[in-house]
Amino acid sequence: MDHKMKHRSGYISFGEHSASNRSLFYALGYTKEDLSRPLVGICSAYSEIVPGHAHLDKVAEAVKAGVLMAGGTPVLFPSIGICDGIAMGHEGMKYSLASRELIADSIESMAIAHCFDALVLVPNCDKIVPGMLMAAARLNIPSIVVSGGPMLAGRLDGKSCNLSTLFEAVGAYKAGLIDEEKLSDLEQNACPGCGSCSGMYTANSMNCLCEAIGMALPGNGTVPAVSSARLQLARKSGMAVMKLLENDIRPLDILTEGAFMNALAVDMALGCSSNSVLHLLAIANECGIDLDLDIINTISSRTPNLCRLSPAGEHHIEDLYYAGGVQAVMKELASKSLIDTSLPTVTGKSAGENIAKARNMDTSVIRPVDRPYSTTGGIAILRGNLAPDGAVVKRSAVAEEMLVSECTARVFDSEQQAIEAIHGNRIKPGDVVVIRYEGPKGGPGMREMLNPTSALVGMGLDKSVALITDGRFSGATRGAAIGHVSPEAAEGGPIALVEDGDRIRIDIINGTIDVLLPEEVLNRRKASWKMPDRPPLKGWLKRYSELVHSASTGAVLSINKPAVK
């Protein structure tokens, strides 16, 4: 493919003005023949610290082979990536969400600085997937995502187990329900190898939604990390990006408003992580699309929940794969016109063409659309005087008896305080744990609250105790865990005004969350509120806290947020 001055890389590949540019490529071992072809950047998040990324070197090599086979010159470069599980429960978690913005910014920097003609994005875990999609939308050069794939579930005593099993086991151990030997056995068996953790947690949610939104080939969300089919998918993705380049199909051609509606419908059907709301809002913002929380509730109201994967049920991503994967779920939804099948995708075909041969091969894993787990989606948006700008809950992971509840507030100004109270048996049935000053600004970084929610589950309190926070939750969270409360406490939101003993009513069915106090009482408390003293911030977190917007906007940075009309 002769691309002389046709593509971006032509500026550094051809002409006397580019002699110095070319000399640096030759220093790397490239040839004139390499530079005569389009330069395809391959951004790999490979590292030796993230289990979901430990094999991405092999995935990236397969992508390179695909690009070469299709007539391009692959150029590998790295991305950072934080393991949320390892970062959980300490200061490191403050950096997790913030890293999403760093990833998007760094890919933008690399792609523009080196004149890449196209991109293949190779993520797998939590913030890396949305960060890369944000970059693709911002750059708008032909791009495709191919993830590393899910981890297989662990096995112990004839039963499946996973990371959320282990987090909950810590709570059970603290409550004296299991011994140290059992905890150690789980520790050794919950995560048996590479890949994104095996339930419908944030990583797998976003990898599945890459398919639904049209930015990844079928199978991206569910083909196991250890399967040869994953490497085949990577090769095909490398070839596919060359077709996208040839036909000048760009991310914004695919990431339309309709594509986000499809993604949200699949999100509701799968019962994805509550974090998917945060990330879809941020990706939509990069596309210039106004996606708000009310739209999410509208789609949830008409979309049935077809899957109950861990932590909501006993199935894992490998079960979804063998049942037909995301494409089978989309076909179920299409049978009731719940998705738009006419939309373009990175396959070069429409969403409808992609699912034409899909089959639901296990109705115990993917419920038929006329026999769902529930007639509404797996995520609900709540509003009320406690969350005027909205809050998010993974409805599909909430026990039936907690869908409507009235609880007594137990208020904590940090995650650590709450964990101490839970482990100290100071939380009782009928309480609601309120954790505040953990929002995007207040944390800063909007930490995941998997430790306290898992402790409640492990101690047998998930059917009698709720948790509310302006922070967020892991996709592995289950129970009546309501996060993303906006405005957050650090901005003087109503959650900052709650006191011990206040009564809070939660109605997930009708989408409301209220502290049962007269308005004059809240106004009086607001007048006397002041931000508690916090340790001074420094470095990247200081800049992040100054720039980040509310969770209701996707926690995007102000410099990337359109002006409010």
Image: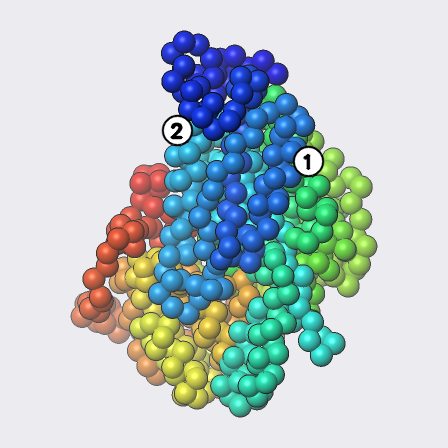
Q: In x, y percent, where is residue 382?
A: 47, 62
The structure residue drawn at horizontal position 63% and vertical position 23%, both measured from the top left corner, is: 71
Q: Which residue appears farthest toward the bottom when viewing the image?
A: 176
Q: Which residue is nearer to you in this view: 528 or 71?
A: 71
Q: In x, y percent, where is residue 520?
A: 25, 71
The structure residue drawn at horizontal position 47% and vertical position 28%, both measured from the top left corner, is: 28
Q: Which residue appears farthest toward the top when viewing the image?
A: 16
The structure residue drawn at horizontal position 44% and vertical position 10%, both measured from the top left corner, is: 15
Q: Is there any visible trace of residue 405 in the rendered image?
A: no
**Residue linked to disc 1:** 236
Q: In which quarter of the image is residue 497?
A: bottom left
| Total numbered circles | 2
Label 1, secondary structure: give it.
Answer: helix
* Disc 2 residue type (three-letter): Ala
Quote the CA–CA distance across marks 2 and 1. Answer: 27 Å
The structure residue drawn at horizontal position 71% and vertical position 79%, both measured from the top left corner, is: 157
**Is the N terminus in the top left, top right, bottom left or bottom right quadrant?**
top right
Q: Quadrant of residue 211?
A: top right
- Who comes first in sequence, dot 2 or dot 1? 2
**Is the C terminus in the top left, top right, bottom left or bottom right quadrant?**
top left
Q: Which residue is nearer to you in this view: 57 or 445?
A: 57
Q: Is there any visible trace of residue 90 in the rendered image?
A: yes
Q: Report the colour scheme.
A: rainbow
**Residue linked to disc 2:** 113
Q: In x, y percent, where is residue 77?
A: 48, 38
Q: On the picture, is 80 further left or further right than 242?
A: left
Label 2, secondary structure: give it.
Answer: helix
